[in-house]
Amino acid sequence: MAVIRRRSALPQAPRYSSADVQNLSDAHDEPAWLRARRMEAWEIYQRTPMPYLEEEWRRTDYRHIRWAEAERIIQPNGATSALVPAKNLAPLTGDAQGGLLVFVNGKLVRSEFADSLAAQGVVFTDLRTALRDHEALVKERLMTQAVRASDGKFAALHAALWNYGAFVYVPRNTIADLPLHVVCYNSAAGTAMGHVLVVLEDNAQATMQVEYASAEDSEHSAYIGATELIVGAGGNLRYVSLQDWNRETFEFSHQRGVVGRDAQLDWVNGVMGSRLTKAFIEVDAVGAGANARVSGFFFADSGQFFDLDTQQNHNAPLTNTDLLFKGAARDDARTLWQGMIKSLPQMQRIDGYQVCRNLLLSDEARMDSIPGLEIEADDVACSHAATFGTLEEEPIYYLMSRGITRPQAQLMIIEGFFDELLQRVPFERVRQRLMDEIEAKIIG
């Protein structure tokens, strides 16, 4: 006798209300325009169903999140920078830093900024201070040019309830020659809603790294975040993001770079932590001659699920995008990469490249890659690919015959697999951090 099984319940939404939005805005005495934007975003959130069967979500089951634990907004409660591991505070791009912002449980607990950059008119501060001291700069760009509340259910929730963030502004024709560093660390369970807004005016240059991490906890947490990278004509931004949440954190994030005429964006995205990550990582090439390179590293093990959804939008002719993601999975982990290259009509002579290479390290792990093209022009050079492989016994045996232990032999081969990606990372210390993460996953 056949047994009919019903699909389990649809995903539940966290229990927030319009009063939460109003109270947040009141508590910080926000300007009227921001209050209005928050309420508009809340209205979008209310009328948008929880994502489930849409194409970009139907392979991602996040119904096991315990919102009763995760929906509580994390409170600072005596947070200090002493709670942050030393490795997260150490500069990854050189001995000197142009600035350091450290957030613990959503509270700014440490702020450093080089006088030499301030003298050039560079702004590097937390988003709330930027609203007070640089309101016009923030108002023009906060969720208006890159990530928008209409991008999805979680984008709308973030727009309504974001509660901390970092703001970077580099004026026209200015080179910020010292790297900027932001650390977002959670020591308690609950929800964090952080925002990063980076703005480079025409012919400006900057280097920035952002790290996300959290202390171990048995309760579920959520990170509902947004990243906006806006690079003006002729600008050059090198941006590194490293995520290492604890194993009970669920990340839902929207990240988008907007690249102007003849501008450069070199974006490195590393994902190691969390129980589940659903990240939309997008590049909009909006000016002729725009060039964007996106490099992604991910390594999932026991119980982890990474869903990385990338999109390269060619919204101007003569634009180039180059995306390479490399990942590995072991134990019963699962990864999913969905990629798309899009061009608008008449956007001729574009060059879009995307590839995801996957390394399966156990029979129980599962990795899926779905590349795609949606081209509405006829003079283009676009390509995509996805590859899968496993560790072969022959090279492992060869290394072991030279006195190398099996775990070390596996580690050497895996590092070799990631080498193509690591060579795209322009900072030696970032490469070393990623290699350390590989070693931790393989050897412990």
Image: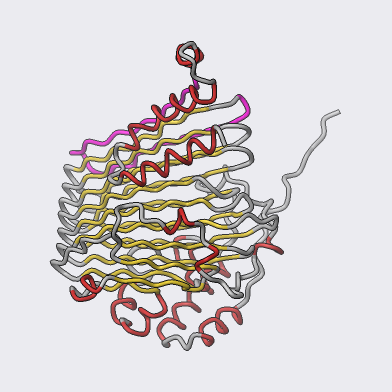
Give the camera-side residue of 225 and 45. 225
Kindly report the secondary structure that dominates the magenta region of the rendered protein: strand
- Above or below residue 236? Residue 355 is above
- Is residue 388 toward the left or the right of residue 66 in the image? left
- Which residue of the protein is positioned furthest toward the right in this rendering? 1
- Above or below residue 416? Residue 9 is below
- Is residue 413 toward the left or the right of residue 276 in the image? left
Q: Can you say which quadrant of the picture contains the C terminus?
A: top right
Residue 390 percent coordinates (x, y): 50, 22
Please indicate, yes or no, whether residue 157 appears anywhere in the rendered image. Answer: no
Tally of numbered discs: 0
Residue 355 percent coordinates (x, y): 36, 34
Residue 286 percent coordinates (x, y): 23, 56
Look at 30% across and 46% down and name the residue there.
Answer: 427
Residue 303 percent coordinates (x, y): 64, 41
- Bounds of the magenta segment: 363-391
How is this picture coloured? secondary structure
- Which residue of the protein is positioned furthest toward the front in this rendering? 403
Give the camera-side residue of 399 and 63. 399
- Above or below residue 216? Residue 360 is above
Residue 364 on the magenta segment: yes
Please indicate, yes or no, whether residue 196 appears anywhere in the rendered image. Answer: yes
Q: Can you say which quadrant of the picture contains the N terminus?
A: top right
Residue 31 on the magenta segment: no
Look at 33% across and 84% down and name the residue there.
Answer: 133
Query: Residue 69 lies in what quarter of the image?
Result: bottom right
Give the camera-side residue of 444 and 341. 444
Look at 34% across and 63% down and name the residue there.
Answer: 146
- Is residue 286 toward the left or the right of residue 7 in the image? left
Look at 27% across and 70% down and name the residue there.
Answer: 114
